[in-house]
């Protein structure tokens, strides 16, 4: 089995204006999905990233610059990640298609995690 990272992107304002009940309904969808995958032995882990900007480091000829990220002009931000086990990319895609993120948002990126010895 290989490990795959599901990168959970969303519009910067996706959750603005939601009532607490609406937001909790979304969270419940994710929790139920994680519980299902955990019971199947497929879920490895994951975290929601903190709201607000992070930092981007950029190497330049004069050193390393630090910028706030994400930039306001971005169409999407990385809101979190999940790690799953799957036999191959096709299996990872099949699992990812059932993720509530694809109900509540429009983009999910899948990347295979490089195994370490």
Image: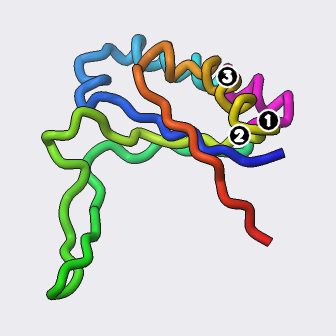
x and y, in percent, of residue 69 in the image: 24, 54
**Quadrant of the snapshot with the N terminus:** top right
Q: Is residue 41 magenta?
A: yes
Determine which residue is flagged by label 2.
84
Residue 55 image label:
none
Q: Quadrant of residue 31?
A: top right
x and y, in percent, of residue 2 in the image: 77, 47
Q: Is residue 101 magenta?
A: no
CA distance for labels 1 and 2:
5 Å
Mark 3 or mark 1, which is nearer the start of the sequence? 3
Query: Label 1's element?
Result: loop
Q: Residue at x 58, y 45 (%)?
A: 111
Mark 2 or mark 1, which is nearer the start of the sequence? 1
**Quadrant of the snapshot with the C terminus:** bottom right
Determine which residue is flagged by label 3.
33
On screen, residue 47 versus residue 107, left or right, reads right
Mark 3 or mark 2, which is nearer the start of the sequence? 3
Determine which residue is flagged by label 1.
42
Q: Main secondary structure of the magenta part?
A: helix
Q: Residues in magenta?
A: 32-43
x and y, in percent, of residue 99 in the image: 60, 22
Query: Label 2's element?
Result: strand
Q: Nearer the viewer, residue 91 or 47?
A: 91
Indicate whether 87 appears above or below 29. below
On screen, residue 40 versus residue 29, left or right, reads right
Q: Are marks 1 and 2 in contact (CB under 8 Å)?
A: yes
């Amino acid at each position: 089995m290989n490990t795959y990272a599901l990168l959970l992107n969303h519009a910067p304002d996706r959750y603005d204006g939601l009532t607490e009940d609406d937001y909790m309904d979304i969270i419940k969808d994710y929790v139920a999905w994680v519980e299902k995958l955990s019971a199947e032995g497929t879920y490895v882990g994951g975290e929601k990233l903190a709201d607000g900007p992070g930092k981007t480091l950029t190497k330049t000829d004069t050193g390393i610059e630090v910028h706030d990220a994400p930039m306001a002009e971005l169409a999407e931000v990385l809101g979190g990640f999940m790690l799953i086990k799957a036999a191959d990319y096709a299996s990872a895609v099949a699992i990812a298609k059932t993720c509530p993120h694809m109900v509540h948002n429009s983009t999910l990126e899948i990347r295979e995690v490089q195994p370490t010895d």
